Image: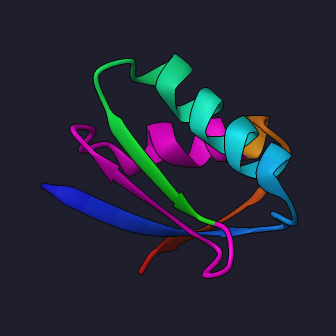
Amino acid sequence: MATTYGVGGMTCQGCVNAVTNAIKLAAPQATVDVDLDGGKVTVEGLDDPAVVAQAVTDAGFDFTGAL
């Protein structure tokens, strides 16, 4: 099951890569799809929003919760 979360502060492809890599580091099995224009990330294969929140925050972005 995939869950979509809001992510604030992304402005470029480097930001997309940082968010993707941070989540993949925390959960290598997860599938991550970042929508830069929409300010959101969809994660499949990881059911713990706290892990996603911590990864996004650690990467320097604002985690705004499930959408």
Q: Kindly identify the residue that appears in the image at 47 percent across and 67 percent down.
A: 5
Task: Check the picture and name the quadrant holding the N terminus.
Answer: bottom left
Quadrant in the picture for residue 22: top right
Q: Kindly identify the residue that appears in the image at 38 percent across and 18 percent down.
A: 28
How far across and down, in percent of the image, does residue 29 sit? 28, 21
- Residue found farthest to the left: 1
39 inside magenta stretch? yes
Above or below residue 12? Residue 26 is: above
Q: Kindly identify the residue that appears in the image at 58 percent across and 39 percent down.
A: 20
21 inside magenta stretch? no
Q: Quick check: 61 left or right of 33?
A: right
Task: Check the picture and name the quadrant holding the C terminus.
Answer: bottom left
How far across and down, in percent of the image, does residue 21 sit? 62, 28
Q: Quick check: 8 left or right of 47?
A: right
Viewer-proximal residue, 67 or 16? 16
Number of numbered markers? 0
Q: Kindly identify the residue that appears in the image at 57 percent across and 49 percent down.
A: 53
Q: Quick check: 30 left or right of 55?
A: left
How is this picture coloured? rainbow
- Residue found farthest to the front: 13
Quadrant in the picture for residue 34: bottom right
Magenta residues span: 36-56
Above or below residue 23? Residue 4 is: below
How far across and down, in percent of the image, does residue 54 sit? 61, 39
Quadrant in the picture for residue 25: top right
